[in-house]
Image (tube, rainbow, N blue to C red):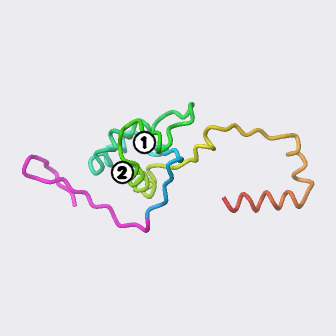
Amino acid sequence: LSSESVDSDSLHLQQYPLLNKLPEVHPYEVPVWFLRTEDSREYEHAQPILTQLLPFFMEDGRDGGSDIATICRRTSLEITQVTNLVAFLTQREAIRLVDRVEMSHVYVCTSLLRDLPRHERLRNACVEYCRST
């Protein structure tokens, strides 16, 4: 449902299809906006608090981004409000969630990496780990 003209006597409604269960969202996860900036307008009408949260979702990430708990502290919003909105946007692929740990640590390969192709057990363990994540 959508209304073309919005004035004091009308109501603007948008109906999104009901999808499966919303994804689980944790306070330590960092929401990252995945769509073009102009695509955010579609969601801002349906979710008014998005205008307050969007700057956090679009941070450049050089400082690791803001996790959901930090966003709630900085905006004085309830964590339930933010996690529900983030779950909704994640389900619609507007946002991707990244663990805070992944964004704040630097991973460096050691010289042992060159042994991976020669050791079947290590190679299989690596493949299994990659498939499970």
Tell me the element at label 1.
loop
> What residue is at 62 percent from the left and 37 percent from the top?
104
Q: CA distance from mark 1 to mark 2?
A: 23 Å
Left or right of 52 in this view: 58: right
- Above-or-below relation of 23 to 50: below
Q: Are marks 1 and 2 in contact (CB under 8 Å)?
A: no
Residue 6 position in % (x across, y down): 13, 48
Left or right of 26 in this view: 132: right
Specify few, some or many for label 2: CA neighbours under 10 Å numbering under 14, 14-19, or 20 or more: few
Write down the residue under mark 1: 36
> What residue is at 43 percent from the left and 50 percent from the top?
94
Write down the residue under mark 2: 81
Left or right of 97 in this view: 55: left
Q: Earlier in the sequence, mark 1 or mark 2?
A: 1
Amino acid type, mark 2: Gln
* Quadrant that contains the N terminus: bottom left
Q: Quadrant of residue 131?
A: bottom right
Report the magenta residues as a range. 1-21
Q: Spot the residue most to the left.
A: 9
Q: Which mark is residue 51?
A: none
Which callout, 1 or 2, points to the residue nearer the camera?
2
Residue 37 position in % (x across, y down): 40, 39
